Image (spheres, rainbow, N blue to C red):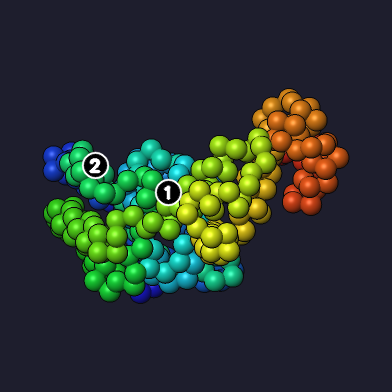
Amino acid sequence: MKNIEFKYLEVSESDTDFGLWVNTVGFQSIEPGMNYPLTEHPSGYYFNPEKGRVLDEFQFIFISKGEGVFSSYHYNEMKVNQGKLLMVFPGQWHSYRPDKTKGWDEYYIGFGGPTIAELIAKTPLVQENQILDIGLNEELESLFIRAIEEAQKDKQATQQYLIGIAMHIIGLVLSANFNKGVKDELEQKIQSAISIMKKNISNEIDILQIASDLNMSYSYFRKEFKKKTGTSPNQYFQELKMKSAKDLLYSSQLAIKEICFQLGYSSPEYFTNLFKKHVGMTPGEYREFSQCKDK
């Protein structure tokens, strides 16, 4: 296939009578070092990966090569690689991007309608488990390719044909996911650890205790956590704290000393030094810089 192929479809009133319609299908091959996403997409779909986006549709994004990261309300920037399928829900904030040094190939299909919403609600496909390990699946890849080819022909009853392909993709995803186990127990444990970190953002945490509570040895927990997120548990927790500090510096008038203690740091000096190490500037400099950017 070409480096990029996509089609955004018109949905007529008669198409909506089916209760299921396809809005977009496409493919992107992002080489290492390329900007992402490519600028050819319409404004409703083009997005800044740093800010993310919200869509009014379901989307399946299948990574057939390379690796990158995915984040949403339920996932705080998880590593994803070839063989993973990302599922996005209507009205849900999300973001994803390929690794700058490795790139990736992605297929995607966006669809909506009350019939499909009711159907998906009856399946194990849920927002808490959006990263599905499908594996390198030639049948799934061929369905995406056929959907792109049919959409580009733009013939009469294209929507109805694409509905059939979309349903086939959903069935294949369910089958592949079920055969691998509906929930990846290890991934769920990592998500539980992240949830504990988020709930204790204002405190210090005991990583050894978290591993024990999840019935994992510390060394295994640390190894698997780093494999999933790209960083150690302690580093990840500090990054969460730094993100909260940046949010408070930007959006509140709290004194730096108050932010320091609100996030559980022992002294403003320690907080300032740690913040500068992570961000490259002091808290005061960051507040001034972030507020100037919006003027």
Can you see residue 135? yes
Determine which residue is flagged by label 2.
121
Q: Residue at 57% across / 43% down in the picture?
A: 197
Q: Quadrant of the N terminus?
A: bottom left
Seen from the viewer's position, the closer of residues 253 and 223 is 223
Q: Residue at 15% across / 57% down in the picture?
A: 164
Q: CA distance from mark 2 to mark 1?
A: 24 Å
Q: Point out the tag, 2 or 1, that comes first from the N-terminus.
A: 1
Residue 289 image position (x, y, % from top left): 77, 40
Horizontal side of 196 relative to 44 (left or right) equals right
How would you rate the neighbour count of disc 2 (Cα within 10 Å): few for under 14, some for 14-19, many for 20 or more? Answer: few
Q: Identity of the amino acid at label 1?
A: Tyr
Residue 204 image position (x, y, % from top left): 67, 41
Q: With respect to residue 65, does 77 lie above or below?
A: above
Seen from the viewer's position, the closer of residues 275 and 33 is 275
Q: Residue at 20% across / 40% down in the picture?
A: 118
Determine which residue is flagged by label 1.
45
Whether the residues at callouts 2 and 1 have beta carbons within 8 Å, the answer is no
